């Protein structure tokens, strides 16, 4: 089934499933936030509204990445290091877009922003995330690891390098 056109809402479908209901719910929420960027926004409200949606996206993506990495660590996913690196890259790109938009809301069109977020969401979920679904499905121990990740402002249990953690980056601004 082809992807919907870039301007329409993106819909989560079972073919995006990654073998864990909590992580699927995270992806649905991120897609929901993306779709808010794609809705018509009155021009007067655009800067503030877009800013808050972007903030929510960056914050929730960081939280989600920490949850996903905790789940993958719990099942000894062999490609965890590469997956973490992919998350870092996306987080840095998203932070850069956010900073650009904060400095000058006119520098990026809403379409450009939505296309970027849609691109990384779709590519990451359907590519790199789908790749671990076989390692997570049927492994309930991953749920406990996911639930142990604090919402924001804290680090996951026994995290390797706090300075490398996207949660820390968001918390420190
Ligand atoms: Fe994910
Ligand atoms: Fe991921």
Image (tube, rainbow, N blue to C red):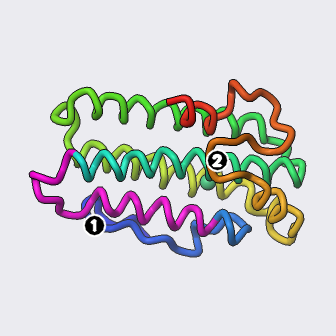
Give the secondary structure at mark 1: loop
Q: Residues within 10 Å of mark 1 (few under 14, many from 20)?
A: few
Q: Position of residue 105 (x, y in %)?
A: 20, 36
The count of marks equals: 2
**Secondary structure mainly formed by the magenta segment:** helix
Residue bearing mark 1? 8
In the image, the segment drawn in magenta is 24-47
Asked whether the beta carbons under mark 1 and mark 2 sit within 8 Å of each other, the answer is no
Say which residue appears at 30% left-offset and 44% top-offset: 113
Q: Which corner quadrant of the image does residue 36 belong to? A: bottom left
Q: Quadrant of ligand 1?
A: bottom right
Give the number of the mark in front: 1 or 2: 2
User: In the drawing, does residue 125 fall left or right of residue 149?
Assistant: left
Q: Examine the structure image and report whether residue 34 is included in the region drawn in magenta.
A: yes
Q: Work out whether mark 1 precedes mark 2 in sequence or the reverse, and give the earlier one.
A: 1
Q: Position of residue 64 (x, y in %)?
A: 62, 52
Residue bearing mark 2? 65
Say whether mark 2 is within 8 Å of ligand 2: yes
């Amino acid at each position: 089934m082809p992807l919907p056109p870039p301007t329409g809402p993106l819909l989560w479908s079972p073919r995006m499933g990654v073998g864990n209901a909590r992580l699927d719910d995270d992806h649905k929420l991120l897609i929901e936030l993306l779709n808010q960027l794609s809705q018509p926004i009155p021009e007067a409200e655009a800067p503030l509204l877009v800013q808050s949606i972007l903030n929510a996206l960056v914050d929730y993506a960081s939280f989600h990445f920490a949850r996903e990495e905790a789940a993958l660590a719990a099942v000894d996913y062999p490609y965890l290091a590469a997956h973490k690196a992919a998350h870092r890259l996306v987080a840095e790109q998203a932070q850069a877009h956010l900073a650009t938009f904060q400095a000058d809301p006119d520098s990026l069109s809403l379409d450009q922003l939505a296309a970027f977020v849609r691109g990384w969401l779709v590519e990451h979920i359907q590519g790199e995330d789908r790749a671990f679904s076989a390692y997570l499905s049927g492994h309930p121990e991953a749920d406990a690891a996911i639930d142990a990740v604090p919402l924001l402002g804290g680090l996951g249990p026994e995290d390797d390098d706090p300075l490398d953690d996207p949660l820390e980056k968001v918390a420190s601004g």
